[in-house]
Image (cartoon, rainbow, N blue to C red):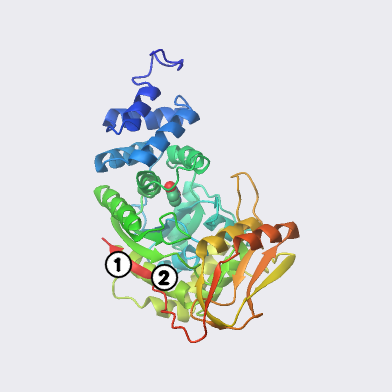
Amino acid sequence: MMSTNPARNTEPFDAVDVIRVKRDKGVLSPKQIDWVIDAYTRGVVADEQMSALNMAIFLNGMSGDEISRWTAAMIASGERMDFSGLSRPTSDKHSTGGVGDKITLPLAPLVAVFDVAVPQLSGRGLGHTGGTLDKLEAIAGWRANLSNEEIFAQLESVGAVICAAGAGLAPADKKLYALRDVTSTVEAIPLIASSIMSKKIAEGTGSLVLDVKVGSGAFMKEVDKARELAQTMVELGKSAGVHTVALMTDMSVPLGLTAGNALEVRESIEVLQGGGPEDVIELTVALAEEMLAGAGRTDVDVRAALADGRAYDKWRDMIAAQGGDNDAPLPVAKYNEQIVAAADGVLSGVDALAVGVAAWRLGAGRARKEEPVQAGAGVELFAKPGATVRAGQVIATLHTDTPERFGRAKEALDGAFTIAPAGTEVAPSKIVLERIA
Ligand code: URA
């Protein structure tokens, strides 16, 4: 077959042949994988060809060997950071993405209290799961872009950094993730596992804890699929010499009582000041204990550091080090509307995906990566499953600067709050479902 690729004579493979192997359920050779990732990063393999290959992988899967080679090729597409020169061990966390998932905010300073450095290289949100950088950018003056030297210096001085992953880190993933987002190929285990682990291994953390979300608001809706993803990532981490553990955690209900950038910063500060919703505290503590254990610190009282203000002091240092004004008021959206309970009874469910989509439609998230987000937009909940409610009681407030968005946000919330007859027992939801090591 004639190729339309002008570089054919100098490239060792043809993208069409590589796509055909996966389309026909074959196994890609290590050389084919190395080439296709490198050639896509260089722009030799076109977006439409990579889209076809992603879809073939989505439909037909990959073997363990293919996933680990694909991950290695993505790591090799960019730089590798090295924190071995720091005076303390490093530990990081990565979540597969959820609704109201602000855990990184209290977690990074909390772990740093115990002299373990946290290099959190994060991203912006796309779709219904919010992005850590978008949340922190709600703080006046806070700067997401740091040079590698600044990251290193802040890890030495404060012990925690949350900042944008630089363009040099796994550039293949940056291109691939944007492509997957617009071609409906995000929710594939080989692609998610390689995307996350390439960035985390390239980042150079010594120890890693993965928060693998399960439920309506997560990429993996079923426990079996989430377990397979967790096991795949733990294997990738271990074979790269990174101490890796995964917690599978519930994402059928939003985490905490807020979804939206400034709203989530406010709730995180409440947790750092010793208050806040119990599910956020429980998950923050569970992840902190795993991160600390991975770095060799097992005899520490993590909850105490939230309760006595040490984690909050560390947060203030971390925010100030990146230009953030700790004392500036957080932005508040110009308009709000209330959602009320439709009946008397017990709230038995609050659908995470519906709340995430509503927050996104209110302006907390973006549909295209170049769009700005609204700092004050989002959903504030006043009741979680198990709460007794009365018809007409306010159970949520919607916030936005652009009131024409209320209609579509309310549509997303249609049926999101389930009310069972009064007296129904609603079992308290478990946050941590399984641990995979
Ligand atoms: N987060 C990532 O970084 N990559 C994915 O593919 C999914 C979630």
Q: Is residue 44 above or below residue 422?
A: above
Q: Residue at x 37, y 40 (%)?
A: 59
Q: CA distance from mark 2 to mark 1?
A: 15 Å
Q: Is residue 76 left or right of residue 179?
A: left
Q: Is residue 242 above or below residue 167?
A: below
First-in-chain label (2 vs 1): 2
Q: Amino acid at mark 1?
A: Ala
- State the residue in front, 195 or 289: 195
Instruction: Name the residue tied to disc 1.
Output: 293
**Residue 152: x %, y % from top left:** 44, 53
Q: Is residue 56 above or below residue 143?
A: above
Q: Residue at x 34, y 21 (%)?
A: 13
**Residue 385: x %, y % from top left:** 49, 76
Asked whether residue 12 is in view, the answer is yes
Q: Secondary structure at mark 1?
A: helix
Q: Secondary structure at mark 2?
A: helix
Q: Residue at x 35, y 63 (%)?
A: 248
- State the residue in front, 77 or 376: 376
Q: Residue at x 34, y 55 (%)?
A: 225
Q: Is residue 395 left or right of residue 77?
A: right
**Residue 210: x %, y % from top left:** 36, 58
- State the residue in front, 354 or 96: 354
Q: Residues within 10 Å of mark 1 (few under 14, many from 20)?
A: some
* Front label number (2 vs 1): 2
Quadrant housing the N terminus = top left
Instruction: Name the residue tied to disc 2.
Output: 283
